[in-house]
Image (cartoon, rainbow, N blue to C red):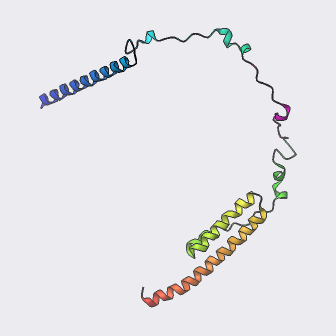
């Protein structure tokens, strides 16, 4: 059994030598194709880039950037008072914005899961429109979307109750 291991080792080392010879011949082929005189190149014979003279590195040789026009100069917001750097409409949100209407999103999801799916999904769509329209400063659209979400929730609950009231007695009579 030990002879087999030795023979296996000899075969592996022979295969590795063949691979190395193949690699060296492949490198020589490429070196000939690329017209290299010597392969692999000697690191000491590598070309050295020319050095940069110290006067080229001095600060005086770097040109100054052009001055920014007066109209483009950044203006720091006032630290106290004023709008605190906010746009005019957002300076005091409690004065310029009405309260956000209720989104009814939780009720929309509950109505979708427990009652009737199609009107519930429509209610979810209107519920999500409430906040997006509010933050887009469409306060009337936000209020209208809130009302529509409320109508679709009620419709989903009523339709779910009516359908279940009809469905369950029919299932009991049919035997399922």
Residue at the image position 75 percent from the left and 67 percent from the top: 143
In the image, residue 153 sits, relative to residue 30, either above or below, namely below
Look at the image and say whether residue 73 sits in the magenta stretch: yes
* Residue 149 position in % (x across, y down): 68, 70
The answer to whether 15 appears left or right of 141 in the picture is left
Residue at the image position 58 percent from the left and 84 percent from the top: 162
Residue in the foreground of this view, choosing between 173 and 20: 20
The part of the image, by quadrant, that contains residue 85 is top right
The part of the image, by quadrant, that contains residue 164 is bottom right
* Residue 150 position in % (x across, y down): 69, 73
Q: Main secondary structure of the magenta part?
A: loop
Total marks placed: 0
In the image, residue 170 sits, relative to residue 130, either above or below, namely below
In the image, residue 106 sits, relative to residue 24, either above or below, namely below
* Residue 147 position in % (x across, y down): 72, 71
Report the magenta residues as a range.
62-77
Q: Quarter of the image for the N terminus: give it.
A: top left
Q: Quarter of the image for the C terminus: give it.
A: bottom left
Residue at the image position 78 percent from the left and 65 percent from the top: 140
The answer to whether 71 appears left or right of 6 in the picture is right
Furthest residue toward bottom: 173
* Residue 118 position in % (x across, y down): 58, 73
Residue in the foreground of this view, choosing between 133 and 25: 25
The answer to whether 19 appears left or right of 50 in the picture is left
Residue in the foreground of this view, choosing between 81 and 75: 75
Look at the image and say whether residue 110 sits in the magenta stretch: no
């Amino acid at each position: 059994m030990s002879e087999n291991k030795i023979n296996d080792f000899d075969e592996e080392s022979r295969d590795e030598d063949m691979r190395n010879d193949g690699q060296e011949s492949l490198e020589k082929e490429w070196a000939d194709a690329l017209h290299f005189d010597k392969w692999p190149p000697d690191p000491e014979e590598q070309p050295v880039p020319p050095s940069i003279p110290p006067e080229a590195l001095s600060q005086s040789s770097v040109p100054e950037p052009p001055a920014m026009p007066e109209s483009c100069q950044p203006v720091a917001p006032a630290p106290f008072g004023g709008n605190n750097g906010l746009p005019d409409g957002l300076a005091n949100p409690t004065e310029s914005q009405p309260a956000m209407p209720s989104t009814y999103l939780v009720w929309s999801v509950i109505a979708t899961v427990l009652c009737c799916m199609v009107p519930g999904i429509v209610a979810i769509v209107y519920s999500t429109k409430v906040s997006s329209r509010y933050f887009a400063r469409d306060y009337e659209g936000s209020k209208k979307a809130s009302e529509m979400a409320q109508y679709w929730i009620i419709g989903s609950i009523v339709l779910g109750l009516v359908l279940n009231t009809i469905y369950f007695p029919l299932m009991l009579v049919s035997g399922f």
